[in-house]
Image (cartoon, helix red, strand yellow):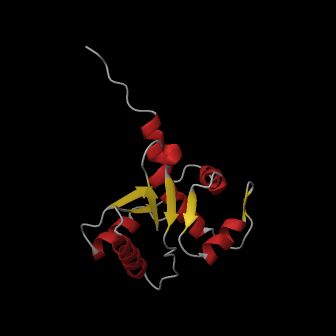
Amino acid sequence: MAGVLAEGPPADWRAYLLEDASLRASSPSAWAQAAIDAARRHGADRIVAEVNQGGNLVGEVLRQIDPLVPYRAVHAARGKAVRAEPVAALYEQGRVFHATPLRELEDQMGLMMAQGYAGQGSPDRVDALVWALHELMLAPAARWSQPKLRTLG
């Protein structure tokens, strides 16, 4: 779960990771409830989830718990390491901060290499971080710096 202080131009924006709410749930409804609880706990605008493997399942399960939950499905078109590069640049620029130690997330971050993830299993926590920062900083910054052209007439 991340929050962004977005005042002024995108170069001035800062992100604060408040919590890593990742978990190994016993059922789809358990992870959906945990995601909704985390979103409510932090006043999130929406839940963002990668749906490459699960298709509509994520949205359907979330909406079984809360039919009005703000939710956005995202689809990965590039590999994890390539998607993580812009987020790594935000860290290098000193624009991302962890409000508390997030040991398991930070362990996964340390195993991300240019060639991919060097750890066991999937870097699920890093993936969630990348999508969160993409939604909160990278995509809005791109829209801010490249506004739609208006025709005069």
Relative depth, front residue between 148 and 6: 6
| Outermost bottom residue | 26
Count how many numbered circles sit on residues in the image.
0
Quadrant where the C terminus sits is top left
Does any portion of residue 75 appear in the rendered image?
Answer: no
- Give the residue displayed 24% in from the left and 66% down from the top: 68
User: In the figure, is residue 58 to the left or right of 112?
Assistant: left
Measured as percent of width and height from the top left, residue 141 is found at 47, 43
| Outermost top residue | 153
Image quadrant assignment for residue 33: bottom left
- Give the residue displayed 43% in from the left and 51% down from the top: 6
Is residue 89 positioned above or below 32 on the image? above
- Give the residue displayed 48% in from the left and 40% down from the top: 142
Measured as percent of width and height from the top left, residue 61 is found at 35, 72
- Give the residue displayed 45% in from the left and 54% down from the top: 136
User: In the figure, is residue 152 to the left or right of 82?
Assistant: left
Relative depth, front residue between 51 and 13: 13
Measured as percent of width and height from the top left, residue 97 is found at 56, 63
Does any portion of residue 112 appear in the rendered image?
Answer: yes
